[in-house]
């Protein structure tokens, strides 16, 4: 019955168009390429954005956690909590407000290698006076 309904091309009737079973992957490749570029660009901005020359050491890398707080001290003594500038007097209250895990929160200190030792020690003393004990100093690995 189906052949009578659609007929054959030779009898003057229209034939049913065949189904195309091939998948066009060009749009998929385009979308994936755009996503790859977006992820590559955003990965560069995920680290703390204060440019510093960190000292180089042979220390082993520690396991990084998602919600660690980072304090950066530039060589001119300016202090940054995450990416916002903060004074030494305000550091204690801002740390307590931002610490999600309470006083067990890990706090990383990044100090410029050409900077003074004094401002970094003042930051460490302020953090310790606030009640935080899990403090780490961030360095760069020595590359041959």
Image (cartoon, rainbow, N blue to C red):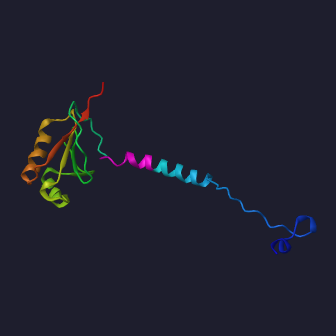
> Does the stretch in magenta take in 40?
yes
Report x, y in % for residue 47.
32, 46
Numbered-mark total: 0
Residue 62 vs 27, above or below: the answer is above
**Would you say residue 21 sits in the magenta stretch?**
no
Q: Is residue 142 left or right of residue 27?
A: left
How would you classify the magenta stretch by its main secondary structure?
helix
Q: Residue furthest right?
A: 11
Q: Is residue 126 left or right of residue 40?
A: left
* Displayed quadrant of residue 19: bottom right
Q: Furthest-left residue in view?
A: 129
Quadrant in which the N terminus is drawn? bottom right
Q: Nearer the viewer, residue 113 or 78?
A: 113
Residue 101 at what x, y percent from top left?
A: 17, 58
Q: Measured along the vertical axis of the image, is residue 121 above or below residue 11?
A: above
| Residue 131: x %, y % from top left | 8, 54
Q: Looking at the image, which residue sits at the far front?
A: 1
Q: Which residues are magenta?
A: 39-48
Quarter-of-image position of residue 95: bottom left
Residue sitting at the far top: 144
The percent coordinates of residue 129 (x first, y second) are 6, 51
Residue at (86% x, 69% y) in the render: 14
Task: Say which of 64 and 4 sits in front.
Answer: 4
Q: Quadrant of the C terminus?
A: top left
| Horizontal side, residue 140 vs residue 118: left or right | right
Please name the residue shown 11% across and 50% down the image.
Answer: 127
Name the residue nearer the viewer: 69 or 16.
16
Please state which of residues 25 and 81 is positioned toward the viewer in this rendering: 25
User: In the visual, does 141 lie left or right of 39?
Assistant: left
């Amino acid at each position: 019955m189906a052949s009578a309904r659609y007929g054959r091309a030779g009898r003057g009737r229209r034939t049913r168009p065949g189904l195309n079973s091939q998948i066009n992957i060009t749009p998929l490749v385009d979308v994936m390429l755009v996503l790859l570029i977006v992820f590559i660009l955003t990965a560069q901005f995920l680290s703390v954005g204060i440019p510093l020359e960190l000292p180089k050491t042979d220390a082993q890398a520690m396991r990084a956690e998602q919600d660690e707080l980072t304090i950066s001290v530039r060589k001119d003594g300016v202090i940054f909590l995450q990416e916002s500038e903060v004074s030494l007097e305000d550091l204690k209250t801002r740390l307590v407000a931002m610490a999600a895990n309470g006083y067990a929160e890990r706090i990383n200190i990044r100090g410029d290698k050409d900077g003074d030792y004094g401002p970094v020690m003042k930051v460490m003393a302020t953090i310790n006076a606030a009640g935080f004990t899990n403090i780490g100093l961030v360095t760069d690995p020595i590359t041959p």
